[in-house]
Amino acid sequence: MEVKKLFKFIENNNTEDKLIRLQLDRFADKIDNQIQNKLMTDLMVKYADLSKSFEEKNKLLLENRKKLQKYNLHLEELVNEKVKEITEAQMATIFALVKLAESRDDETGNHIERTAELCRLLASLLRKHTDYKELIDEKYIENIYKASPLHDIGKVGIPDAILLKKGRLSKEEFEIMKTHVDIGYKTLKEVHSQYKGNSFLQMGMDITKTHHEKWDGTGYPRGLEGQDIPLSGRIMALVDVYDALRSKRVYKEAYSHDKSLNIILDNKAKHFDPLLVEVFADSHLEFMKVHDYFQ
Ligand SMILES: [Fe+2]
Ligand SMILES: [Fe+2]
């Protein structure tokens, strides 16, 4: 537009000729258009350059982000793998120690394998029940499977003369036998004091401490009643008794599944949590299958 102003000035000051003024106007417009076109072209080129470099930078950024994500994923997988390896090694060690302790009492056979499987089954079935939907999650089921083998760990402190006695225990001997609960609980509690917040150990302690308590309060060692007994202890109690009923003891033969089921039904709300008995009875054939598989 500067050129247009210049010609306007010439027109006002130097000539009255309308034709020349018109020509000058057209010429000025033409020059303005050319300047504008040139500007537009320059701008478009600049824009194209900028957008190309932006695209390249963006592409690079995306590639780097993908590389980082891949690296993070790999790192996470490595950590998970290591944690799994360590956990499995720890579990194998615990299992070996429990087996060693149980090997003194050769009548129990695969008792700890069977009870671990049966605890997992009962907890999984109970999970579908509204009362326990929130308490029983995947971690709870994993914990009960891994912690239930610890339930009789305190038997290492029971003298051979009592633990291996061929025949029923006397009243005094039974009192000593009962101490396996607190021996096991105190051992785990000491370990737990170094690993506070470990849910596996906490469940191991609950199970060890309460697996001989009874729903009606007539169990030992504390005579806890009903829901004062932790759920894991109530699950262990039922499973432990079912497996003991199905196994041969010095004072009895191995009972059939049906006979064992009836004994458990008779003890509903006496020895056992009534809800657990119902869940067990509803799926009793599944318990029989798991028990027989690990026989
Ligand atoms: Fe026990
Ligand atoms: Fe047991």
Image (tube, rainbow, N blue to C red):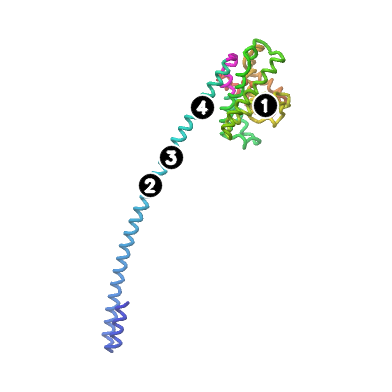
150 and 143: which is toward the camera: 150
Identity of the amino acid at label 2?
A: Asn
Depicted 42 relative to depicted 19: above or below: above
**Residue 124 appears in view:** no
* Residue 62 relative to residue 10: left or right: right
Viewer-side label of 4, 3: 4
Which residue position holds label 1?
Answer: 277
What whole-number distance in Å separates the C-alpha atoms at marks 1 and 4?
33 Å
Which residue position holds label 3?
Answer: 73
What whole-number distance in Å separates the C-alpha atoms at marks 2 and 4?
39 Å
Q: Which mark identifies residue 64?
A: 2
Which residue position holds label 4?
Answer: 90
Q: Which residues are magenta?
A: 104-115
Residue 148 in percent (x, y) is at 59, 25
| Image quadrant in which you'd find residue 43 | bottom left
Q: Residue at x 31, y 78 (%)?
A: 2
Ligand 2 position by quadrant: top right
Label 1 SS = helix
176 and 126: which is toward the camera: 176
What whole-number distance in Å separates the C-alpha atoms at marks 2 and 3?
14 Å
Label 3 SS = helix
What whole-number distance in Å separates the C-alpha atoms at marks 1 and 2?
58 Å
Viewer-side label of 1, 3: 3
| Image quadrant in which you'd find residue 28 | bottom left
Viewer-side label of 1, 2: 2
Residue 177 in percent (x, y) is at 66, 18
Identity of the amino acid at label 3?
A: Leu
